Amino acid sequence: MTSNNPQTREWQALSNDHHLAPFSDFKQLKEKGPRIITSAKGVYLWDSEGNKILDGMAGLWCVAIGYGRDELADAASKQMRELPYYNLFFQTAHPPVLELAKVIADVAPEGMNHVFFTGSGSEGNDTMLRMVRHYWAIKGQPKKKVIISRKNGYHGSTVAGASLGGMTYMHEQGDLPIPGIVHIAQPYWFGEGGDMTSNEFGIWAANQLEEKILEVGVDNVGAFIAEPIQGAGGVIIPPDSYWPRIKEILAKYDILFVADEVICGFGRTGEWFGTDFYDLKPHMMTIAKGLTSGYIPMGGLIVHDDVVEVLNEGGDFNHGFTYSGHPVAAAVALENIRILRDEKIVERVRTETAPYLQKRLRELSDHPLVGEVRGVGLLGAIELVQDKATRKRYEGKGVGMICRTFCFENGLIMRAVGDTMIIAPPLVITPAEIDELVTKARKCLDLTLSALQG
Ligand code: PXG
């Protein structure tokens, strides 16, 4: 409890007494007290101490159109007055969900024309797992149950989501993964590439998929799931050789390919989807986050026509949520996508702000702490190292956390994944705001270096 502000202290006391926060050490949070975020506009947040903070993470990778857009609030309010809730079970539907499914099909890659809605990305991936197994059962191959995923991938925090994900610290709590989910190496050259060149390593990592398919037996494998670019794992941009080799392997074996677009989707790479950026041609795409710019929870699974054709022959799909396709969420998503399209935000990322951010970020490569700067679109990662040439880390110093704390104190949200600093600002960030972000990032790198030397 560090604040002198009575209002902040009151909120922190409520946190201590009643709130259990996600992905947190409850006891440690009680000692430190949470920072209370009270309002936001554009790319900026304000906390209860009056600090203005540049949000380099778009909330949690989601606030694509920036904070404070009245149009989304108005869309929600209008829909709440007209039809605040109705379900999609028992042969009913409502206009916002139908219009939204059509608009998503318009912006999604060719053939991706059907959407199953959920309340989150995790539920989208639960839906995927059940739909993949249902699909193969309908096709008379019920043994094709195994889903291949990747170490250090992130696919959510439900039992299926956390199992699909490759976060060992999540698996350790509660006997995960569940049976039928196996993991292969990730294409993280900087961390795991050893003496290989980036492209050699990309081929090696992709070949792990083929090895795993052969080990499990193609008759037992239902699908491969991957993020086009791993987000929560530390903005892992695969080597150029990776996706082309994965595509060759997928073409060889009869399994489904699921692109988890929860972070890459809706413009983050400068294309509508990460699959457009890498030309991946998936059978299913998990979506959430940018779908509503985080203004209201919503996720879903976009499904290719070829898969739907099979599902159409399978009778009931016994799966769904009370809030599948919630009308208020659908109305907000519709307005969000209208803004993304009308204001040409994805095009602006591709042609203007992504090239500018990537150029400015790479200027940080000369900093003594920085081993690599990488990025695509409005995603960026900065690797903090002790020795640039050997990529040796500062072992046991928690450098990433030191840097993250300096960032917070200096008005910038930049996340730490281990000793990798990551950013994913709102898609509406301007060149001037990018300048501010990079200037603050350099200052915090300097402060981190001084702290390590002091
Ligand atoms: N897939 C991907 C690729 C994600 O990034 C999910 C699925 C799950 O979505 P929901 O809506 O169920 O959270 C995500 C979510 C982090 C962090 O630390 C990232 C996410 C969630 C929480 C923390 O970067 N991504």
Image (cartoon, rainbow, N blue to C red):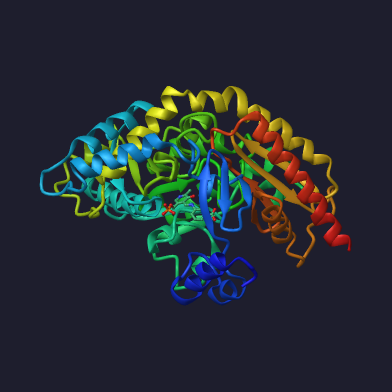
Residue 334: name its quadrant: top left
Is 66 displayed left or right of 3 in the figure?
left
Picture residue at 41% right of the left edge, 29% below the top = 339
Residue at the far left: name it: 91
Is 366 displayed left or right of 27 in the figure?
right
Q: Is residue 286 visible?
A: yes
Q: Is residue 283 visible?
A: no
Is 83 displayed left or right of 233 in the figure?
left
Picture residue at 36% right of the left edge, 40% below the top = 73
Quadrant in the picture for the C terminus: bottom right
Picture residue at 29% right of the left edge, 38% below the top = 331
Q: Nearer the viewer, residue 182 or 350?
A: 350
Quadrant in the picture for the N terminus: bottom right
Is 182 displayed left or right of 307 in the figure?
right
Q: Please, is residue 196 above or below residue 9 in the view? A: above
Residue 71: name its quadrant: top left
Residue 34: name its quadrant: bottom right
Q: Position of residue 428 (x, y in %)?
A: 54, 32
Q: Position of residue 172 (x, y in %)?
A: 51, 71
Q: Position of residue 395 (x, y in %)?
A: 78, 64
Q: Please, is residue 27 above or below residue 270 in the view? A: below
